Amino acid sequence: MASPPTYPLIKLPHPFLTSYRITTTASTPPALILSLDSQPTNGQTPPEPLHNANLTFLPLSARPSTSVPPASDNSLWARAYRSPSTTITWTSTSPPSLAQIWNIIHALYLSSPTNEYFRLSLQGRGKETIHTELLTTGLGISHPQPWSGKVIDPSFASSLETNGLMILRSAFWQGAASPFGPRPIWTLGSGTSGPLRKPIHEYPLMPEAYTQTMKFPSEAIYARHPIRRPKPHPGSVCYSRYVPELEEHFSLEVVDWKDKEHLELFNKWQNDPRVAAGWNETGTLDEHRVYLRRLAEDPHVLCLFGRFDGRRFAYFELYWATEDHYGAHYNSSPYDRGRHSLVGDSTFRGSKRVNAWYSSCIHYCFLDDPRTANVVGEPKATGGTILSYENSQGLTIGKYVDLGHKRSVHSVCSREKWFQLCPVFWDGREKPLESADRAAWNAKL
């Protein structure tokens, strides 16, 4: 007898950290229910409950391979028809909240991350309301129909879903129907609003207005670009995501150059010979204080610590590419963003951890401003390991770039491609595949 499937805990990001558990009901056939597991004392209780005792759902299941269109039919309808499905059911007289539906979808994508989309049926009073809300927020779309004039196998015609829904993984990870305001839940963070009387996530997107940055003669930068929203408050958590394969939260903490602990940790890492070989930023505490202060006062760079369950292990610099020195080396879009990174604590190694922090930094770049069309980088052209990780996240070599201190590759991934892949989960590879793109380029240079 096959053992019952096991499901990971489902945990909200900061500031909540609320934990939910998927359990199997005693009904026939068995269904699943998402119930509250715990509310940690270092987290905040969500503004509204995201669990509901009257709400059940079925495990994702696909139609038999003999009962679906062949792979040679790659139409939108056929792909949707072959996708797995679930049914969400409630017995209450009024429909559950959209936030509670969102959390079930959250649970399904944490436990089954490889599904690009799945079919959803709703059963219960007021299901039309939920159907409309899913369509309006973009988390769901109507089930595609066969193209006009297309001949459909009679065995499929009886099961055409004229009122069905498709839930999109790409829309979910972009924050569609996020339960607590317009900001995606992973970017609510903790303390990001600083002295603001209302949380920043309650305000609209930063309006698009342009300014100019001129840094001659100290730096070869003269650029016209959008005015950037002021950075998250120093010391705050600006991004957080639960990583099921690690059973830990990854988070991004804004570096505070005035914080003694932050400064000493940065200084320690930069003076580590392993880190210095790549960064060339060895120095004293005073020199590093000046370095971090300069970047804190520069609107185009955001300095962050990477953390697993609150333990700092890495340092990142995220930059707006247009007003960065790198923006002169390619035709940047106004909201393109790039990354520099270092792992200061070498005990936080391994492919699972690298995939978690690599994907999360890119995820934050795309979520922080939905107008970000591309994430870019300029890693060293001979850095095979880094380029393999770039490749695993969908970034490919656009060209080679000769900077003053190194030959780099222009590494780039579009928003569309990254969210098609949604590489936030570990694919099981202990070592990512070498970039075939890099191998082809290197053979010619």
Image: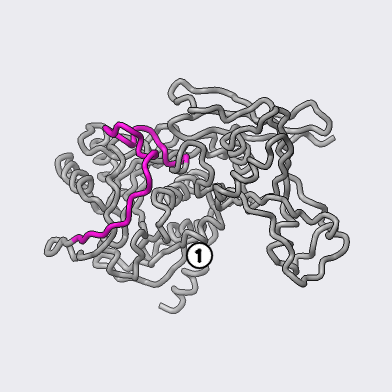
Where in the figure is residue 72, as x and y percent of width and height? 75, 69
Residue range corresponding to the magenta coloring = 185-213
Residue 103 versus residue 46 in the image, above or below? below
Q: Residue at x 46, y 76 (%)?
A: 443
Q: Is residue 25 visible?
A: yes
Q: Residue at x 26, y 32 (%)?
A: 195
Q: Quadrant of the C terminus?
A: bottom left
Q: Amino acid at mark 1?
A: Ser
As for residue 155 lying within the magenta part, the answer is: no
Residue 234 versus residue 167 in the image, above or below? above
Q: Residue at x 29, y 65 (%)?
A: 327
Magenta residues, dominant SS class: loop
For label 1, the crowd category at 10 Å Cα-Cα, with few meaning under 14, some 14 to 19 and many 20 or more, is many
Where in the figure is residue 154, as x and y percent of width and height? 88, 63
Residue 205 versus residue 156 in the image, above or below? above
Label 1 sits on residue: 435
Instruction: Say whether residue 217 is left or right of residue 129.
Output: left
As for residue 198 lying within the magenta part, the answer is: yes
Q: Which residue is outermost to the top? A: 41
Q: How many marks?
A: 1
Query: Element type at marker 1?
Result: loop
